[in-house]
Amino acid sequence: MDKTEAHQRIEKLKAWLKKWNYGYFVLDKNDVSEAARDQIKKELTELEKEFPEFITPDSPTQRVGSALSGKFAKIRHITPKQSLSDVFSEEEFRDWEERILKLVPGETLDYVSEVKLDGLNISVIYQKGRFHKAITRGDGVYGEDVTHSVKTIKSVPLELNEVGYVKLDDYPVIEVGGEVLMTKKSLEDINAEGGQQFANPRNAAAGTVRQLDPAVSAKRNLEMFFYSLNLTEKSKLPAPNSQQDILKLLNDLGLRTEPHTAHHTSLKSILSEYQKWEKKKDSLPYIIDGLVVKVNSLRHQKLMGSTAKSPRWAVAFKFPAEQSTTKILDIEISVGRTGAMTPVAILEPTQVAGTTVSRATLHNEDEIERKDVRVGDTVIIQKAGDIIPEVVQVIKDLRTGKEKKFRLPKECPVCGGKIIRPEGEVVSRCSNKNCGAQHQQQLELFVSRSAFDIDGLGEKVIEQLIDAKLAEDPADLFTLKYEDLMQLELFKDKKTQNLLDAIEKAKLVPLPRFLFALGIRYVGAETAELLANHLHLKTHSVTITEEQKRDQMTLFAEPAASKKADVAEISTLIEEMKKMSPEELNAIDGIGDKVAESIHEWFRDEKSLRLLKKLEGVGVKLLMEEQAKKSDKLKSLTFVITGTLPTLSRDDAKALIKQHGGHVTSSVSKNTDYVLAGTEPGSKYDTAEKLGVKIIGEEELKGMVE
Ligand code: IVH
């Protein structure tokens, strides 16, 4: 066969295989026998071996790449990934509906229900219609790059279908989300092989996705169903108006959706769907743990918005959590990062939802009192999803009279400090700010993956550093010396040098991760991201190493593209934060009263400011989000956005303004230059009119930057 013939044959074989695989793995129908498919794949593999110049990344033979050598790269999500809030009863579900109805007065809502798949959420990015990357949810802001193993999942197409007349090259960047899971049958098969044993399909799926060797992932038959879609650029594809449209568009693109969805116009219909699945759940080949109910209209979804953690327009209506009975052997106190005392029941080990449970939270003193939990009691415990197991109820009939009541100690079990319970609060705390437990947890948080991400500083090492008085606060980590580390257990030359290098590298830290690392009460990774997006700090440019550049990598930035980065000094952050009132913080979408108050207080606390200054002194610098600057047309202009814009999402509008040098803030003041208003604007519109701030629409904004 000559070169031209080989090329033609390869293209033909690929087209056939693609069509058959799509029919088999996505549409669940058998166009040809498996043997025929295998035969064609064999022919293609052989031809590609002979003519490697014709191998393309989307060839069905290219699903399994080579093994990764180390840990997964961390990647920032295009938009932060949220999770769903849970409801566990009809009553809680009704409350949810009541709450969201109030957010859209006068509107009638309809819903889509989907079964809640018990796997792991993965985002897949398609660029020009071709599979680009797959990322785990991670902490919502950063996920892990699991492209190599997700690519082996046969129901994930390497190329999307062309919809209408839109050519693949004209596709925008498409981010789709879905669940990767393993069927009950596949799990049985894997466990029967006698190798690594998995407690349940979810663990098996998670373990397989995080396999370094894609050949192993490929053998384990993972499946994927898609349920969400994010068209990130202006797109020629039909714009979806509802979750139903999204599911249809996903299908049209060739992405498999779970078939058991239903449309509802009444609460009654949703409740009966829930009851139906509660009874029927075991008949499905994979595990489901509830129903996901989503408001259908995207317009309604937008009006309802999100909290920092989850959308208001969707809810996970969970089936009753799996429960088990066991005995309480003891009650211990665990001291948290903020000094909070949590009573923990030490249990006779028992199996719940496929895992062994030996500790369960008792939440606080009042809960113990309310449930009348005593040491020696037989109790029902439950585990709901990933939540820490909890004690639900005491079986009082089984008491022998020997059970002992529990009293919270007066002194902290870790440092002996006085325990206080502020008036009106249910949580008791250690009053000693230097308490060892608080200190340990503060340091663990500081070096964790979503914070400074310092490898080699585990729990044990931190413990030793604290004992040796080498880490009185997190800033001390940056002045550790070779001799300091060499005196620690198991530290030899290489390990010491690696840790010192990791610490040095960490001095340049992305702003959101820095804010998270501070351990401000109520500020998780997502809130830190919201706050960081709101801040416009004065920056200067520095030269950075390639490794640092990679850490800052957003999805499409080439790691080595530039070795310059915009950084800000911590003192600039202090200045900005000092200027910010609780009201301004509260005005950031996703930051509520309590959180705003906590942030505001933290940046006014003497001890916090000392820590910040010390961090600056040891050379910590804040790495700012890279903004692809397009022009300076909006330089020094401040915008506030309100209402729904005709084509741009709020984030797109924000990005556009920033790309042209402008700022976006959340509240209107006399310093605001323009209010960008869409339909149904909020009170910001009225304030703008009152203050005489110029109000513009999307078209005018676009005109300004053209
Ligand atoms: S929508 C805002 N739909 O449940 C998050 N999630 O608790 C968008 N899940 O992380 C998720 N089935 O892993 C959605 N039909 C479904 C789902 C589903 C399972 C999982 C998913 C998510 C978790 C949220």
Image (cartoon, rainbow, N blue to C red):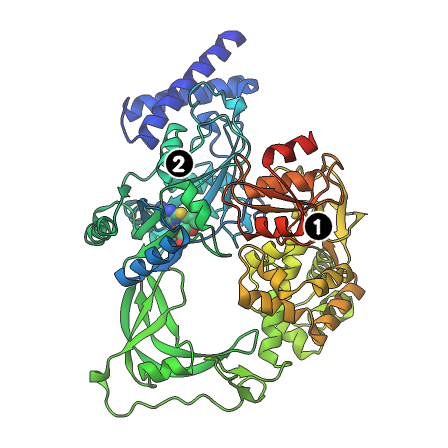
Q: Is 592 on the left-hand or right-hand side of 242? A: right
- Residue 54 position, x and y percent, is 54, 18
- Residue 68 position, x and y percent, is 56, 43
- Residue 225 position, x and y percent, is 37, 40
Asked whether mark 1 lies closer than 8 Å to ligand 1, one says no
In the image, what residue occupies the spot 46% across and 30% down?
A: 158
As drawn, 576 above or below 542: below
Residue at which label 1 appears: 624
- Residue 10 position, x and y percent, is 46, 16
The amino acid type, in three-letter code, at marker 1 is: Met
The amino acid type, in three-letter code, at marker 2 is: Ile
Q: How many other residues sit within 10 Å of disc 2, few (<14), some (14-19) or many (≥20)?
A: many
As drawn, 348 above or below 554: below
Q: Is 405 on the left-hand or right-hand side of 628? A: left
Q: Is 301 on the left-hand or right-hand side of 71? A: left
Choose top left, top right, bottom left or bottom right for residue 471: bottom right
Q: Judge by depth and name the residue closer to the eye, 483 or 459.
A: 459
Residue 160 shows in the view: yes
Q: How many other residues sit within 10 Å of disc 1, few (<14), some (14-19) or many (≥20)?
A: many
Residue 480 shows in the view: no
In the image, what residue occupies the spot 66% across and 76% down?
A: 466
**Secondary element at tag 2:** helix
Q: Quadrant of the C terminus?
A: top right
Q: Is 585 on the left-hand or right-hand side of 547? A: left
Residue at which label 2 appears: 246
